[in-house]
Amino acid sequence: MSYFHITRKIKSQIAFFKGLAKDTDGASAIEYALVVGLVALVIAAFGNGIGTQVTAILTRIQTALT
C-alpha cells in the first residue's frame, strides 16, 4: 500500500470519528432511557403504598355506583 493510500485511509477514519463525536442522537436515547429507569425505580419503591390508595379509591367509587 502506498503512502498516499495510507494517509487517505487515516484521514477518512479521522473524519468518521469526528462525525461520531458530533452525533447527538444516541445521547438523547440514553437520556430517555435514564428517565424511564428512574421512573420505574420510583414506581417500584413507592408502588405498594400508591397501589393500596388507588385500590381504596376504586373501591369507594364502585361502592358509590352500586
Image (cartoon, rainbow, N blue to C red):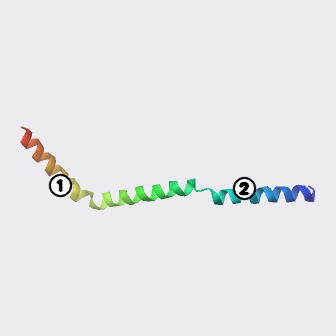
Identified by mark 2, the residue type is Phe
Q: Position of residue 37 (x, y in %)?
A: 41, 58
Q: Position of residue 31 (x, y in %)?
A: 48, 58
Give the distance between the C-alpha atoms of the residues marked 1 and 2, in whole angstroms: 54 Å
Q: Position of residue 34 (x, y in %)?
A: 45, 59
Q: Which residue is mark 2?
A: 16
Task: Say the numbered circle drawn on residue 53.
Answer: 1
Residue drawn at (54%, 58%), measured in percent from left and top? 27
* In the displayed structure image, the side of residue 8 where residue 64 appears, left or right: left
Q: Position of residue 10 (x, y in %)?
A: 81, 59
Identified by mark 1, the residue type is Gln
Residue 36 picture quarter: bottom left
Query: Which type of secondary structure does the marked residue at label 2 adopt?
Result: helix
Of 52 and 15, nearer the camera is 15
Disc with the residue nearer the chain's start (1 vs 2): 2
Q: Quadrant of the C terminus?
A: top left
* In the displayed structure image, the side of residue 49 where residue 10 appears, left or right: right
Residue drawn at (12%, 44%), measured in percent from left and top? 61
Q: Quadrant of the N terminus?
A: bottom right
Nearer to us: label 1 or label 2? 2
